Image (cartoon, rainbow, N blue to C red):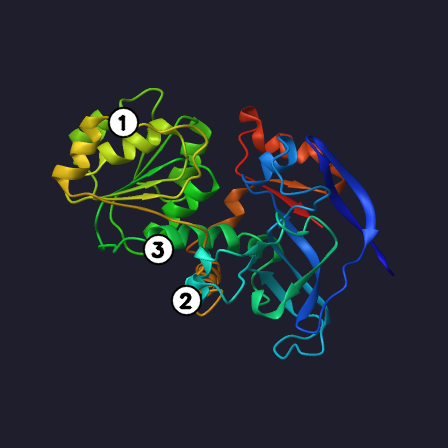
């Protein structure tokens, strides 16, 4: 067999299910038979808005599967192993890689964006990017490991104090995972803010102590009356939630920006004074890696799934086949669909 099915992006809103060559694998790579691949929010502009590095491209970086073949230099895997994949391909020789900061690599590649990904039946992956998964973790749950690591990396950008109060802005996949990771880390009260009731109800099911619909409630006034949180985690990437995350925390509070910004964010003097006079700690969080590569985040995410600290089944609102193609991307973008995670079962 030399051909496989893959979703290939050829242009804006031009996603085709095609037969393409099964990728060749190098001596230090394994060939993975993909079993599940999630659609990330970052895949939407690639598939629907033409925001790709080049065409054609096979998307998909949240995935799991079975080892089909192994290269001659591969030592730790064999045919039939159940695996999840870390999609970052750091160069290994730039200043940041040598510092043990692969997420800051200046010459990285990435499965599903800079080279072909896993919305396909097979993908070739370097051995160092492969993580074994136990039998009790199913493939759909294992495909959630990558977004879990994003949340873990984000909350660990600041020192967490057990029993403290936090607010999470945004109840999408990363926001809900941030919530669950915070609870797993022993935080006390965690608020979740969004404008979609269905997502907020999902947050409640996943352990949120209080939910706030920003369409109905003045978020900042409400938090003022309840007691300002020490931590704010912004996952929505909108100017209003970015501003609210700064205004919401108490003096000496800590703010982590996890969500990717899509619009200009202007900081008024009042908010700057809040940062200055309140000595706030504000930081960003990028990807989900540390050293030794791929990092503690990946083993921790797997452990949280095994221990049921992360309830992956609640995230899987839509399971699709590759043949659904473009419609699966539309589902994730459609606010009426109330989707959290759209997953291809392959």
Q: Nearer the viewer, residue 150 or 300?
A: 150
Task: Measure how far apart labels 2 and 1 are at the Cα level.
Answer: 39 Å
Image spot of residue 265 (x, y percent): 35, 29
Count neighbours of disc 3 (C-alpha within 10 A) and say few if under 14, some if 14 to 19, many if 20 or more. few
Q: Which mark is residue 100?
A: 2
Q: Earlier in the sequence, mark 3 or mark 2?
A: 2
Whole-percent x, y for residue 120 in the image: 73, 50
The quadrant holding residue 101 is bottom left
**Can you identify the residue that label 3 sits on?**
184
Q: Secondary structure at mark 2?
A: loop
Between 25 and 155, the one nearer to me in the picture: 25
2 or 1: tag closer to the N-terminus: 2
Question: Going 75% across and 54% down the picture, which residue do you hit?
Answer: 121
The numbered mark, 3 or 1, whose residue comes first in the sequence reads: 3
Q: Is residue 19 visible?
A: yes
Q: Evaluate whether residue 132 shows in this view.
A: no
Give the Cα separation between the discs numbered 3 and 1. Answer: 25 Å
Nearer mark to the viewer, of 3 and 1: 1
Residue 199 locus on image (x, y percent): 45, 33
């Amino acid at each position: 067999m030399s051909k496989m099915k893959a979703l290939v992006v050829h242009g804006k809103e031009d996603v085709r299910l095609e037969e393409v060559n099964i990728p060749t694998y190098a001596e230090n790579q394994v060939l993975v038979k993909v079993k599940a691949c999630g659609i990330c929010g970052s895949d939407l502009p690639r598939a629907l808005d033409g925001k790709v590095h080049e065409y054609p491209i096979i998307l998909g970086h949240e995935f799991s599967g079975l080892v089909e073949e192994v290269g001659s230099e591969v030592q730790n895997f064999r045919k039939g192993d159940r695996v999840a994949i870390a999609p970052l391909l750091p160069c290994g020789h730039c200043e940041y890689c040598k510092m043990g900061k692969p997420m800051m690599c200046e010459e990285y590649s990435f499965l599903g964006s800079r080279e072909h990904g896993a919305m396909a039946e097979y993908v070739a992956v370097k051995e160092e990017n492969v993580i074994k998964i136990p039998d009790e973790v199913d493939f759909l749950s294992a495909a959630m490991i990558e977004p879990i690591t994003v949340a873990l990396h984000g909350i660990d950008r600041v020192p967490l104090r057990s029993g403290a109060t936090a607010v999470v802005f945004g109840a999408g996949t990363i926001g809900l995972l941030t919530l669950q990771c915070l609870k797993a880390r022993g935080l006390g009260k965690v608020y979740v803010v969004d404008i979609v009731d269905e997502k907020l109800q999902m947050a409640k099911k996943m352990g949120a102590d209080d939910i706030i619909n920003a369409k109905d409630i003045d978020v900042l006034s409400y938090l003022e009356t309840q007691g300002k949180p020490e931590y704010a985690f912004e996952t929505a990437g909108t100017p209003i939630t970015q501003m609210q995350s700064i205004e919401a925390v108490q003096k000496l509070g800590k703010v982590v920006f996890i969500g990717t910004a899509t619009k200009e964010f202007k900081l008024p003097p009042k908010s700057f004074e809040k940062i200055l006079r309140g000595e706030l700690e504000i930081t960003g969080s990028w990807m989900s890696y540390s050293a030794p590569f791929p990092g503690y985040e990946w083993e921790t995410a797997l452990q949280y799934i095994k221990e049921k600290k992360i309830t992956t089944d609640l995230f899987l609102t839509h399971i699709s086949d590759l043949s659904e193609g473009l419609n699966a991307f539309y589902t994730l973008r459609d606010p009426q669909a109330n989707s959290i995670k759209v997953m291809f079962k392959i």
